Amino acid sequence: MISKLKSDQVYHLLYNKIVKGDLAPGSRIPAETKLAAQLGVGRKTLRTALGRLEDQKLLIRMRKSGTFVADLNGTSPDPEILLSTPAPQKNIKHKFLIINTPKGSPYSLTEYLREYAAECGIETMEVDIYFFHTSELEERFHWLSDQHFTGIILTAHTISPDDPVLQIQDKLHLPVIMPAAWETDMAITPFFMIPLSPRLIFMKAVNYFFKEGHRRFAFLTMNWKESPDDFYNISDMELQLLTQQKHILRRSACENVESIEAAIEYFLQQEERPTALICYNAYFAVIAAEYLKKRGIRIPDDISLIGFGHRKECEYATPAIPALSLSFPERCRAAIDFLIAGDYRHEVVPQISSVIIAPESIKKIFHS
């Protein structure tokens, strides 16, 4: 049995088996639980490796059938397997309206919603949230009512109290669900919500580092114009209580390489270097990790770090960079399943928790 392989090692192991023909084209690989046990790794580590192989078209995942080895010549697995896997039937009972956040939003859920709705055979239509910011709002509500939707998914993570989209439930008399709603939304909207609390999620990360023995923290925040030191509404006093530090080491940066590197250099120049770096988002964490390597700082031996949000660069880095996953795919599946089930009560709305990706890349510090 192979003991505790990293995801890149598992990837290379399976890659070589496919290339050499040990895993034949069209063959089904074992179920995740069984394969993870055979390799002596966790399912998350295995999924990361399998995801890379899928991206390279070396594996093909078929819903309800399993994962199969692709033909290296570019063809799909055995045609008989494909013929025995029927395409999703169109679900004529449901048609969902997806209201998107502005294009380019880092919290976009649309791709995951499209994918899962297609798997379920559900027709969707998409509009931007600014579709409702018009003097012809009543006409647009009438047009939407003629489309015969059965449910609405609002991808925004926060809404202002005067946003016209808040009228949609009363106008269309349809269930509306937000897969990733911030705490503030719960006070101003009547919609169903799968809550997302960046504040609590980040406090969870700090607490995790503390339990692993870290006592010298640095916080890399976003340089917002309104509040340069904003860190998901977590005050210095709260951070002091969490970390047991008298003085909080905090630096803000703009979302560019030079600004992030300057902030990291500031941390490195401190008399007592931090052992834990908490980054505002995963992009900051990726840039920070690259700069630390250039400076000869070992990760995680000298400094462990974590970012907010999930980027593939975090998983594929060596070593992997821990990140707080917001579980967007799971949130989108849960939102669609909720609308399909038709039990529209707030108490049955699913709760999706965040998870820490690659926690094995956080050094455990022992105190004498």
Image (cartoon, grey):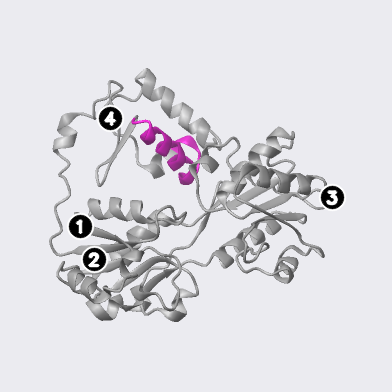
Indicate which disc residue 27 carries. Answer: 4
Residue 297 coordinates in the image, percent (x, y) = 74, 37
Side of 315 relative to 52 (left or right): right
Q: Earlier in the sequence, mark 4 or mark 2?
A: 4
Tell me, yes or no, whether the two marked residues, 2 and 1, touch with CB atoms within 8 Å: yes
Q: Earlier in the sequence, mark 3 or mark 4?
A: 4
Residue at numbered disc 3: 272
Magenta stretch encompasses residue 47: yes
Q: Quadrant of residue 169?
A: bottom left
Rounded to the nearest whole Å, what is the CA distance between mark 2 and mark 1? 10 Å
Q: Earlier in the sequence, mark 2 or mark 1?
A: 1
> Compared to 170, does 260 lie above or below?
above
Give the residue displayed 39% in from the left and 33% down from the top: 53
Tell me, yes or no, whether the two marked residues, 1 and 4, touch with CB atoms within 8 Å: no
View extreme (top): residue: 20
User: From where the camera sits, is residue 168 visible?
Assistant: yes
Give the residue displayed 35% in from the left and 75% down from the top: 164
Q: Which residues are magenta?
A: 37-57
Give the crowd class for mark 4: few <14, some 14-19, many >=20 residues within 10 Å.
Answer: some
Residue 337 coordinates in the image, percent (x, y) = 28, 63
Numbered disc 1: secondary structure: loop
Residue at numbered disc 2: 340
Which amino acid, mark 3?
Answer: Glu
Residue at numbered disc 1: 122
Give the residue displayed 26% in from the left and 46% down from the top: 63
Front tag of 1 and 4: 1
